[in-house]
Amino acid sequence: MALTKEDLYSCKIFLNAALPLAKVIAADIPKLGNKFNRTHAVIQVSALDPDAPGGKRATHFVINSGEWLVHTDRITKDPHIELEFKSVPALNQFFKGKIGPATLPKFHVKVKKFPDFLAFMQVLLKMASLLGATDAPEDEATKKLLVKCYFYLITSGISQLNKAGHEGVVNWTKPSPDRVYALAVDGHDDISAYIRIKAGKSKAGRGNYKRALPFFKMRFPDYDCALGILLQKDDLLEALKAKRLILDGAPEFAGQIGNFMMEVAALAK
């Protein structure tokens, strides 16, 4: 059965925008990251798709002594560990939290890599816990990590939708001159992300864009203000009035970015 557009869009977001956050989580939570200090393994997450090159869609990680390399949209033929879903819809449902016999992947684990498999699953569970949060966490470190993950997910997710041919995003990027749209928390340069678009092409980046000032930036005074919008607890207009959200650029662009943020969120839930 051919994939629907929504199946493809969700798959792109999960494999190419959400899964790379595993590296971020391992780096920011030493209790999890230290489990990979002696790891030498290739770990792949894939979904069978007869219409895709190689018969599946996949993202894989190469981990060497705690250093992670992420390869999105790339298949490796003989990983040490693989979570292989029977279909793209099964992968989507699993990462949306609808876990059951029909959505569970096959686990292929080489014998000596079982401890690495367990460590990787712990990272995935933490990622699911963070992205599934409905309320802001209490401690500052977790707030910071959650905002960072959302910024990365949103910018990468929008870019992935553009690459997958999402009509609304393509109509936004195709006529655009070279522009950078950014998300940031004031006073925390490491908690920022951006998407650069030009003539139909897009590229997401982490941190501040350094070549020029962004064309448009959504910034927040602190993590709580950011999470109010990211977790859809706060009204956009009310946040603007109360200066819980500051826009550097024309307000109409906030509507565009806001719509795409909600589209990424809807496809990931």
Image (tube, grey):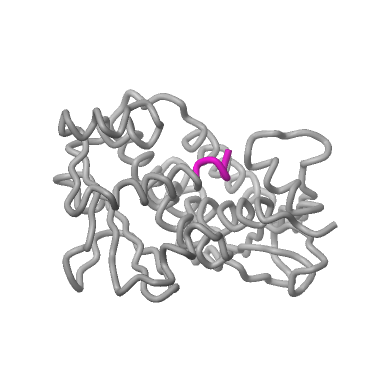
Q: Is residue 124 above or below residue 57?
A: above
Residue 237 in the figure: left or right of residue 166: left
| Residue drawn 21% across the image and 40% down it | 220
- State the residue in front, 172 or 31: 172
Q: Is residue 159 left or right of residue 107?
A: left
Q: Is residue 100 magenta?
A: no
- Please name the residue shown 49% across and 65% down the image: 170
Give the position of the C terminus as an image quadrant: top right
Q: Residue at x 20, y 53 (%)?
A: 250
Position in image of residue 133 (x %, y %): 47, 29
Which one is in front, 11 or 43? 11
* Pick the front one: 128 or 118: 128
Where, quadrant-wise, is the N terminus in this rendering? bottom right
Q: In this image, 202 relative to 239: left or right?
A: right
Q: Start and end of the magenta stretch? A: 265-269
Where residue 94 appears, as percent x and y from the top left, is 69, 41
Q: How many labels sit on residues? A: 0
Q: Viewed as shown, does residue 204 lie left or right of 170?
A: left
* Helix, strand or loop: magenta stretch: helix
Residue closest to the eye, 96 or 20: 96
Picture layout, residue 34 above or below residue 205:
above
Q: Please tell me in which quadrant of the rendered image residue 103 appears.
A: top right
Residue furthest to the right in view is 1
Position of residue 26 measured from the top left corner of the image (x, y, whole percent):
45, 49
Q: Point out residue 147 in the picture as x, y percentages from the top left corner.
A: 34, 41
